[in-house]
Image (spheres, rainbow, N blue to C red):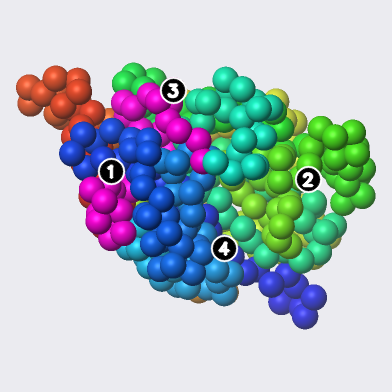
Amino acid sequence: MPDHAPPFTIGVEEEYLLVDVDTRAVANDPPPELFAALHDRTGGRAFPEFLRSQVEVATPVCRTIGDVRGSLIELRRAVVEESARFGLAPIASASHPFSLSSRQQRTDKERYVALLEEMQGVARRMMICGMHVHVGIDDDELRIDLMNQARYFLPHLLALSCSSPFWEGERTGLMSFRLMIFNGIPRTGLPEKFASWNEYRRHTDMLIETGILADTSRIWWDLRPSARYPTLETRVMDSCTSLEDSVRLAALNLCLMRKLYRLRRDNQQWRPYPELLIGENRWRAMRYSCDAGLLDLGRQRIVPFAQLVEEIIELLREDAIELGCLPEIAGLRDILERGTSAHRQLRIFERALQSGADQQEAFSAVVDWLVAETAR
């Protein structure tokens, strides 16, 4: 690559819910000592989120996917071990099977108090967890161009990450119910398409100057230029229960950005498509995950997801080899073969019911699996 290529560094943020190991319910009031211990052990890389029952972890800036894996292992281990001292355990799942969002307590932090004041009842339902991937793109114009191109792939990333089939004791029929909750907040969903960085700034500056936003961190699109770092931040994904799935999706984000950069460098681009059509694929990913295929917008027909994954693997092969993550990109096939977290949760739930468990016992079996798989 030429000397002016982006750094393509990578950082990953994961959100977990803390559950009581005895009741399997969300722990709505974990002790402050837990977060103090996590802060000390991780050097400030594990901290409370909007809800007191949530923990967010953030890797340092990583140069390789191997570095991402090593950092996530250490961070998950810290949360698992420190939580266990208080009879708690983390679950890397975008929703909890049965706990009620109305029972949760909010973190006493100025940013979150302001969020609750603005969003009201919508914010009170935010018992959801996602995974965010930052890719280092240090040129503003390039960040906007890659955001415009990468919108096409957001449904594919979501479909591979689904982990929220249940909500407050209900089997929702969706594989990612998290986004149904998140969509209730303004400035979410697919990112706008902008002709330039200046056009993006003109629109966002208007919101800031009128007092609607404090800064662009209050824009929660599925993909956005980070307000804090010179990165593109992908936010569409559910929290992945399997650590290896998190690593694979991080690799997929990284390789996609490098591929789209190479297209731009060669005066090409991924063909733009209307938000209506990309939005339809986003809905299909929320509803079906990988089970019903997505619209191939070039061929204008629904294509089985397994075929799309094979095409993505081939599309990104050169970039995956260059970035040292071909095994992780090839490992996307493993997600399809065994299913996402949502698929696996549903299988455990149905198996428990068929073995004679009542619904609450079946939900508890799902939580037990989430606890074990998160720590594995």
Q: Which mark is residue 11?
A: 4
- Residue at 62 percent across and 35 percent down: it is 113
Q: Residues within 10 Å of mark 3 (few under 14, many from 20)?
A: few
In this picture, residue 122 sits left or right of residue 188: left
Q: Amino acid at mark 1?
A: Leu
**Whole-Å distance between the Cαs marked 3 and 4?**
32 Å
* Residue drawn at (49%, 54%) of the image: 47
Dots 4, 2 in contact, CB < 8 A: no
Whichever of callouts 1 and 2 sits on the residue coming sooner in the sequence is 2
**Mark positioned earlier in the residue sequence (4 or 2):** 4
Q: Which residue is mark 3?
A: 102
Residue matched to label 2: 215
Q: Which residues are magenta?
A: 80-107
Instruction: Tell me, yes or no, whether the two marked residues, 1 and 3, touch with CB atoms within 8 Å.
Output: no
What is the x, y in percent for residue 64?
A: 53, 73
Which of the two discs, 2 and 3, labels the residue nearer the N terminus?
3
Residue type of the residue flagged with mark 3: Ser
Residue occupied by mark 1: 370
Q: Secondary structure at mark 3?
A: helix
Q: Earlier in the sequence, mark 1 or mark 3?
A: 3
Q: Position of residue 343 (x, y in %)?
A: 32, 35
The answer to whether the residue labelled 3 contacts the one labelled 4, judged by CB atoms less than 8 Å apart, is no
